[in-house]
Image (cartoon, grey):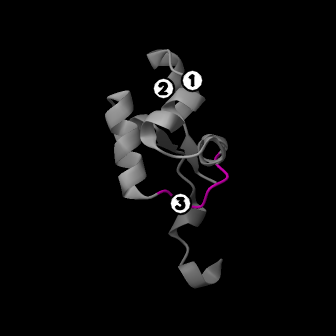
């Protein structure tokens, strides 16, 4: 998948644990773990906004994109 989660780097920069972030955002540690590992298919904008508010960052600080020409395929071609 060309979208990479870079949350671990932000946690390290802020000196915060994933457990602490999950508690402050109001999500389970399991949900946090799934997000950190990139095993989720989506995230609610509300949750992303809370993550950014707690970490004092922008969404682009938590996500990265590696361009892939296959991303331009029509959805029905997958």
The residue under label 1 is 17
Comparing marks 2 and 1, which lies closer to the viewer?
Answer: 1
Whole-percent x, y for residue 5 in the image: 56, 41
Kindly indicate the quadrant of the structure image that contains residue 40.
bottom right
Residue drawn at the location 41% of the way across and 34% of the way down: 61
**Picture quadrant of residue 36:** top right
Q: Which residue is mark 3?
A: 42
Q: CA distance from mark 2 to mark 1?
A: 10 Å
- Residue drawn at point x = 59 percent, y = 30 percent: 19
Q: Residue at x 55, y 73 (%)?
A: 73
Residue at the location (44% across, 34% down)? 24
Q: How far across and how far down the image is residue 45, in percent?
A: 37, 56
Q: Earlier in the sequence, mark 1 or mark 3?
A: 1
Mark on residue 10?
A: 2
The spot of residue 71 in percent (x, y) is 55, 64
Task: Tell me the element at label 1.
Answer: loop
The residue furthest bottom is 76
Where 12 falls versus 4 (above or below)? Answer: above
**Quadrant containing the C terminus in the rendered view:** bottom right
| Magenta stretch encompasses residue 36 | no
Name the front one of labels 1 and 3: 1
| Cα–Cα gap, marks 3 and 2 | 19 Å
Query: Which element type, helix, strand or loop, lies under badge 2?
Result: helix
In depth, the one of 46 and 70 nearer the eye is 46
Residues in magenta? 38-43
Q: Residues within 10 Å of mark 2 (few under 14, many from 20)?
A: some
Foreground of the two, 23 or 4: 23
Instruction: Tell me where residue 54 appears, x and y as whole percent.
Output: 36, 32
Label number found at residue 34:
none
Q: Is residue 25 left or right of residue 17?
A: left
Above-or-below relation of 31 to 6: below
Separation of disc 1 and disc 3 at Cα? Answer: 22 Å
């Amino acid at each position: 998948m060309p979208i990479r989660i870079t949350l671990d780097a932000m946690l390290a920069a802020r000196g915060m644990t994933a457990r602490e972030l999950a508690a402050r955002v109001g999500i389970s540690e399991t949900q946090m773990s799934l997000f950190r590992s990139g095993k989720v298919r989506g995230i609610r904008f509300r949750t992303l906004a809370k993550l950014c508010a707690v970490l004092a960052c922008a969404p682009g600080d938590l996500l990265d994109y590696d361009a892939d020409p296959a991303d331009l395929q029509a959805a029905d071609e997958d």
